[in-house]
Image: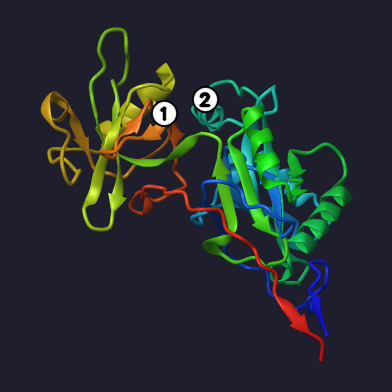
Amino acid sequence: MTRTRRTDERRPADHHAPLPKEFTPQLALLVKAPPEGDAWLHEIKFDGYRIGCRIAGGTAQLMSRTGKDWTGRFRPVRDAAAALPVRQALLDGEVALVLADGRTSFQALQNAFAGAPPAGSLVYFVFDLLHLDGENVAAQPLEQRKARLAQLLRDGGGETPIRYTDHVIGQGRRFFEAACRRGLEGAVSKRRDLPYQPGRGPAWVKTKCIKRQEFVIGGFTDPKGSRVGLGALLVGVHDPRRGLVFAGKVGTGFTQASAHDLRARLDKLEQAECPFAVCPPGRLGREAHWVRPMLVAEVAFTEWTDDGRIRHPSFQGLRVDKPSGQITRERAEPPPVARRKRHADS
């Protein structure tokens, strides 16, 4: 006789697991369309910074996906997390700035960091629970982890900048299309029945309403006319065989403040040599200022051209949480198909 394993079936609990000292996140693979079927649950894709929250001894520490301590950047979140009714915990989520219409905006968050008046509310959207009071919750199925997370945040009570990230089971395409109609960034789809698995793999996938990714800044041009700070950024992506490959210039999306800030940062990195494997041809290559390829820009665009350039790009902000050496071109995969394993009763 066979039976299907239930996603709410508890695995043996380890109540003596030490609280992890580091945050090593599970990452989503980019796909062309969301997966279908009830093996998947779907969450809104937020437009902010991935943050792990480590709670111990009445204090909270906020860590970026690369292990940097960002507690000082998000003090309201730190204070709210420290007040949760736990002795020890490790949460996973995303800190974002929520606009008046309910959308999250990475660009608005960047502007707030640069000193502009906040255009919305700072929120920590928590979507996973990895450790709780000596128990390795990460080993349990996702649906069970989320149920325990929801209970924990309900127990916290009150109005705080920490919010539970709800989800929909199945109906992947409908969920994604609704997110796009609302002007959201996209959807993240996750296997309900699997444990937390650090690193990038097919158990978590993301589908984007618009094309956006990170690019390495390799140079810039001077401003012209009424522009200030800089004219355009020259950006690229790493290729395993060719090195840093030029992907185009980004000349929109800057505020006066962000343009001045970028120019100050880039001036400190200026060098004589072009960092791209093949430098941009013509006047652009002759007039550009080259920089050490250390800064990473988030860029929205409409499409890739056949010769590897991005069309209609717009600068969204700097990504200080992602190393420049790891930036490659994102290529969407076909949506995965989940097949539940069947187990024989003994």
In this rendering, the count of numbered labels is 2
Residue drawn at x 25%, y 12% is: 224
Residue drawn at x 79%, y 73% is: 4
- The reply, left or right, for residue 102 in relation to residue 224 is right
Residue drawn at x 66%, y 67% is: 339
Q: Label 2 sits on what residue type?
A: Gly
> How far apart, in angstroms, are the residues tagged by discs 1 and 2?
18 Å
Q: Position of residue 311 (x, y in %)?
A: 35, 29
Nearest the viewer among 338 and 298 is 338
To which residue does mark 1 refer? 315
Q: Position of residue 290 (x, y in %)?
A: 19, 35
> What quarter of the picture does the C terminus occupy?
bottom right
Task: Tell me: residue 320, above or below residue 131.
Answer: above
Q: Quadrant of residue 273?
A: top left
Nearest the viewer among 60 and 149 is 149
To which residue does mark 2 refer? 115
Task: Tell me: residue 228, above or below residue 273.
Answer: above
> What quarter of the picture does the N terminus occupy?
bottom right
Q: Position of residue 65 (x, y in %)?
A: 53, 54
Numbered circle sitting on residue 161 = none
